Image (tube, rainbow, N blue to C red):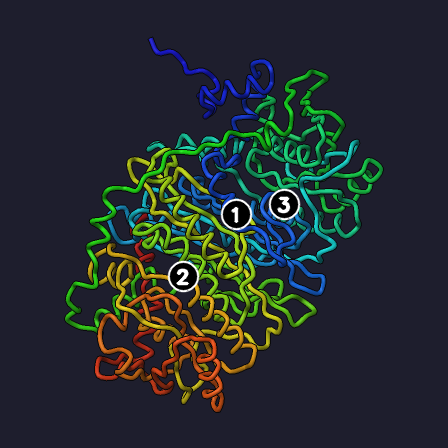
């Protein structure tokens, strides 16, 4: 006879965690209290497997106004202006319902930025899927199409442009797609709000949509456990989004901010009311009373625990002085939003939850918000890694045709244009986008000033698979380099760290090494970590994703008129390669596409050299020495040249001295950029590069209809464009057959 497991186990709590809760309360928790602990002590909310490592990251600097701990980080842009930004994952729900999973990921990250008092200004969406043309390609095409539609459908409706991101493909992401989303917004520094704040007697006002059963258990069922094969059983844990409600919520909250009616503001995302109320009270050093009978619900007969942990979307919790409650209600009514007083901050140590006068739960807020378990899980380097790294592609013979290899890499889905995706997004709404998707970094201006921010997201799963330390380090370095290629000074990062099951020692080793790589690079480049997200348990059926740290880098342009693009802007411009090319093909796109290998050591990374290159790019752009700049990374110099020619619709001739063989063409050596100089400024550029210790090589000249690699091969810009732009639309055209 089967015996049902204890309730705490069915909620994802271990026996040891149940005992710790009992000790903390001095009694056994009831059902509602267990539900509250199950979400707040979940991996997603408590970071119980990761926080010991996350503490080692640099989080402070003169530019950091708000670091980790709030809903989003904040950096100082000068002149009293601030940028709020954050990245999170919505991978698990997107694997089940790709449209709603991605859409509500957008909605949630937007509310994180809004909760800090900033107007959301831009979105980026780093995405990873399985191959579109292999076994399982139909499901991968369905996931890719659904996620892109969800991002566009939600972001377009709320009027926040999607300006960047990435789309990558690898077999390791077939069972578990990786869907990250980043948002940034602007505010005056003196207008910033906090979620963990308030005073005795302050009212807790729930603003926005009604509370339903969608999203119940999202952080404990989906985000803190591996997905089973029968993912349909998890559908109730996927939230349902309403972007039109979100737009009203954005405008109402900003009006409340402008009117000085908010003491604090908190997003209701993971763990719902339980998280918002417990974190607010714990941050204020107070207790709270929460009346579930005052919570507007949109489904009849909801049980108390359902109301407490529902993750229904488009809701915010406002902390309001008691005498300002009527004013808040009037503003919300004008926007057609419900505003319900559901609780009060009060002196004491308990979060008391009642309904119809009955006490349902009484839990100290810090026990939920700050005192979750902390695990130091075993970590060990996997035995199989040595043999994989020894199989170095550099030892393989060159391809029979360099031209065919070049076109294969250019048309590989990881390199090819992602226009199919980003054309489904509104990139220009709000009128602040200066550089839309397709460049090294997006550029968004600050209205009424000459300032702009550049923002990029980067992460190479192949590098993380072969060397997690370098995977983390390269993610930061490439993101900083991409920002610097616009002329912006890198300031700070947010991140989303995507990994498999942390209970497996090799996954914890990968995670720890990645954190070490991120930390070392951030310290060297002066780009502290302002916050982010850890997404564990991205595996199912024996298949785990590659270690995939994704870094969102923010940079500042003091004068957006000096911004750079990646495209060659004119003919007869001299082309230079900044940085040194080494014999490195391990983990490269060439090795994967042409040789069918994901092996060998990834490119080395000299952090001091990276810092010098970034300094040179920023200084040269500020002095108006450069006409264009493009990062050399995935695909190497050959692909950087092709992308610059395609973007500018200008041909180029590259001399034989710099591209004598396939290694020079396709090496992904770090700390390099392809630049053109304005006529008459070439010697000054060389002088500055020499002063700063950055290798400087003239490699070609722009002009003509073709991309020519002297002595090797040539391809017309038009033919390269067809390959580059046509790859993904061709693969996605099979969706019609899938449906048939």
Distance Cα–Cα, label 3 vs label 2:
28 Å
Q: Nearer the viewer, residue 552 or 312?
A: 552
Q: Which residue is more in the foreground, 580 or 424?
A: 580
Which of the labelled discs sits on residue 73, or is there none?
none
- Regarding residue 237, the answer to whether it shows in the image is no
Q: Which residue carries the number 2 mark?
A: 420
Which secondary structure, mark 1?
strand
Alpha carbons under labels 1 and 2: distance apart: 28 Å
Specify the quadrant of the image occupied by residue 447.
bottom right
Task: Name the mark on residue 532.
Answer: 1
* Residue 438, x across and y down, in percent: 45, 67
Is 34 positioned to the left or the right of 3 in the image?
A: right
In the displayed structure, 651 sits above or below 270; it is: below
Compared to residue 355, the image places residue 264 above or below, namely below
Q: Does 483 appear above or below 382?
A: below
Where is residue 520 drawn, in percent x and y?
45, 54
Q: Decide which of tag 1 and tag 2 comes sooner along the chain.
A: 2
Q: Dot 3, how many residues are within 10 Å of its Cα: few (below 14), some (14-19), or many (20+)?
A: some
Helix, strand or loop at label 3? It is: helix
Screen quadrant of the N terminus: top left
- Residue 427 is left or right of residue 575, and the answer is right
Element under disc 2:
helix
Residue 331 percent coordinates (x, y):
77, 45
The answer to whether 652 appears left or right of 218 in the picture is left
Q: Nearer the viewer, mark 3 or mark 1?
A: 1
Q: Residues within 10 Å of mark 1 (few under 14, many from 20)?
A: many
């Amino acid at each position: 006879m089967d015996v049902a497991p204890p309730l705490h186990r069915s909620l994802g709590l271990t026996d040891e965690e149940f005992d710790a809760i009992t000790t903390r309360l001095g009694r056994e928790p009831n059902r509602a209290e267990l539900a509250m602990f199950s979400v707040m002590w979940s991996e997603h909310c408590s970071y119980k497997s990761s926080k010991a490592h996350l503490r080692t990251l640099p989080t402070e600097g003169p530019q950091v106004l708000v670091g980790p701990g709030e809903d989003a980080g904040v950096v100082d842009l000068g002149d009293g202006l601030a940028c709020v930004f954050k990245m999170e994952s919505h991978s698990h729900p997107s694997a089940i319902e790709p449209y709603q999973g991605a859409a509500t990921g957008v909605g949630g990250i937007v509310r994180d930025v809004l909760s800090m008092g900033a107007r959301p200004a831009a979105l980026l969406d780093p995405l990873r899927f399985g191959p579109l043309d292999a076994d399982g390609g139909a499901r991968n095409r369905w996931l890719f199409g659904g996620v892109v539609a969800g991002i566009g459908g939600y972001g377009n409706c709320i009027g926040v442009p999607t300006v960047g991101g990435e789309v990558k493909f690898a077999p390791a992401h077939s069972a578990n797609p990786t869907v990250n989303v980043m948002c940034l917004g602007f505010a005056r520094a003196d207008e910033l709000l906090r979620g963990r704040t308030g005073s005795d007697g302050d009212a807790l006002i729930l603003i926005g949509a009604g509370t339903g059963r969608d999203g119940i258990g999202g952080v404990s069922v989906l985000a803190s456990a591996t997905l089973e094969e029968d993912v349909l059983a998890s559908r109730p844990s996927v939230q349902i989004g309403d972007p039109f409600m979100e737009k009203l919520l954005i405008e109402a909250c900003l009006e409340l901010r402008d009117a000085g009616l908010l003491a604090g503001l908190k997003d209701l995302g993971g763990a719902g009311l339980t998280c918002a109320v417990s974190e607010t009270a714990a941050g204020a050093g107070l207790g709270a009373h929460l009346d579930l009978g005052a919570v507007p619900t949109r489904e009849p007969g909801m049980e108390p625990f359902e109301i407490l942990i529902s993750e229904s979307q488009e809701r915010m919790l406002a902390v309001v002085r008691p005498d300002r409650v009527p004013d808040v209600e009037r503003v919300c009514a004008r926007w057609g939003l419900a505003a319900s007083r559901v609780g009060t901050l009060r002196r004491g140590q308990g979060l008391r939850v009642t309904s119809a006068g009955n006490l349902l739960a009484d839990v100290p807020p810090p026990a939920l918000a700050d005192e979750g378990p902390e695990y130091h899980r075993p970590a060990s380097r996997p035995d199989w890694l040595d043999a994989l790294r020894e199989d170095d592609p550099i030892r393989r013979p060159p391809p029979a045709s360099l031209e065919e290899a070049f076109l294969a890499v250019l048309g590989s889905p990881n390199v090819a244009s992602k226009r199919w995706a980003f054309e489904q997004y509104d990139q220009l709404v709000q009128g602040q986008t200066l550089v839309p998707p397709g460049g090294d970094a997006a550029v968004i201006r600050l209205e009424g000033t000459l300032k702009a921010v550049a923002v990029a997201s980067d992460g190479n799963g192949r590098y993380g698979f072969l060397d997690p330390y370098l995977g983390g380090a390269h993610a930061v370095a490439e993101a900083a380099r991409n920002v610097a290629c616009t002329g912006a000074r890198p300031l700070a990062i947010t991140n989303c760290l995507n990994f498999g099951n942390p209970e497996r020692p090799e996954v914890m080793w990968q995670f720890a090494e990645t954190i070490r790589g991120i930390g070392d690079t951030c310290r060297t480049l002066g780009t502290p970590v302002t916050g982010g997200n850890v997404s564990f348990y991205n595996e199912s059926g024996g298949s785990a994703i590659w270690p995939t740290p994704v870094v969102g880098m923010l940079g500042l342009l003091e004068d957006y008129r000096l911004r750079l693009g990646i495209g060659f802007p004119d003919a007869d411009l001299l082309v230079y390669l900044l940085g040194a090319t080494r014999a490195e093909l391990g983990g490269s796109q060439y090795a994967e596409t042409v040789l069918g290998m994901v092996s060998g050591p990834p490119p080395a990374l000299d952090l001091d050299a990276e810092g010098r290159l970034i300094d040179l790019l920023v200084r040269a752009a500020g002095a108006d020495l450069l006409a264009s700049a493009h990062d050399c990374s995935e695909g190497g110099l050959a692909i950087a040249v092709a992308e610059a020619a395609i973007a500018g619709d200008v041909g180029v001739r590259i001399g034989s001295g710099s591209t004598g063989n396939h290694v020079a063409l396709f090496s992904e050596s770090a700390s390099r950029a392809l630049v053109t100089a304005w006529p008459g400024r070439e010697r000054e550029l060389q002088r500055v590069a020499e002063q700063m210790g950055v290798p400087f090589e003239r490699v070609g000249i722009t002009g003509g209809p073709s991309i020519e690699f002297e002595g090797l091969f040539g391809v017309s810009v038009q033919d390269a464009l067809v390959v580059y732009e046509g790859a993904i639309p061709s693969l996605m055209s099979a969706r019609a057959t899938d449906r048939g």
